[in-house]
Amino acid sequence: MGPEHPLLSTLKTIRRADARVAEIVLGPLTVDDMNQLVCDALRCEPTKAQLLSKFVHQKTGGNPFFAGQFLTSLAEEGMLQFDSDSRTWAWDLDGIRSNASTDSLVDLMIGRVRRLSTNLQSQKKPMGRRSRFRVRPQSRRSARAERKSISTDSGSTALSAR
């Protein structure tokens, strides 16, 4: 992150307000650490996930956030699939290698936002002629009820709902 990154300016503002900020510096994961992360995420044995873990490590440079997002993206794209019969995750590493072209976290996140946007757009349903809405003027009775003041038992505090 550069000195102009929004997160750094936000942290600076928080510190100026005398709030306690705890920073955890997390460097790149080793290949073994990445294998443990992948095994935990996919609930499998280290030997089964070893080649996938090496590939994820190579793609993400060991960045744990990027690795998590990358694995999520693989699952969303169907390259990691959960087999409900065997209750295990399955993947085709050659297929992942040939289709997983993202080399940066920014590109990965942009792709995910675009897919989300496309999914949301496909869920839009046009409103028909019968779905028109009319706004009616508020009746005097309901307007008076909204302006009614409510007092506490002691009578010293009044709350006006307007």
Image (cartoon, rainbow, N blue to C red):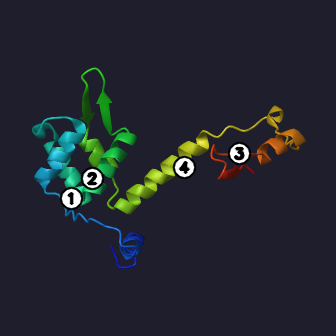
Q: Read off the residue under disc 4.
A: 117
Q: Read off the residue under disc 3.
A: 150
**Circle nearer the N terminus (2, 4):** 2
35 or 54, nearer to the observer: 35
Locate residue 79 relative to residue 64 in the image: left or right: right
Spot occupied by residue 70 in the image (x, y as percentages of width and height): 32, 50
Cα–Cα span, label 4 and label 1: 29 Å
Task: Count residues near mark 4 (Cα–Cα under 10 Å), then give few for <14, some for 14-19, many for 20+.
Answer: few
- Kindly identify the amino acid type of the residue bearing the numbered disc 1: Gly
Which of the two marks, 2 or 3, is nearer to us in this view? 3
Cα–Cα span, label 2 and label 3: 55 Å
Residue 57 position (above or below residue 90): below
123 or 103, nearer to the observer: 123
Spot occupied by residue 120 in the image (x, y as percentages of width and height): 57, 44
| Disc 2 + disc 1, Cβ < 8 Å | yes
**Circle nearer the N terminus (2, 3):** 2
Cα–Cα span, label 4 and label 3: 46 Å
Q: Read off the residue under disc 1.
A: 62
Judging from the image, what secondary structure is the residue with disc 3 in? strand
**Circle nearer the N terminus (1, 3):** 1
Q: Read off the residue under disc 2.
A: 67
Judging from the image, what secondary structure is the residue with disc 2 in? helix
**Circle nearer the N terminus (2, 1):** 1
Task: Count residues near mark 1 (Cα–Cα under 10 Å), then give few for <14, some for 14-19, many for 20+.
Answer: many
Spot occupied by residue 62 in the image (x, y as percentages of width and height): 21, 58
Cα–Cα span, label 2 and label 4: 23 Å
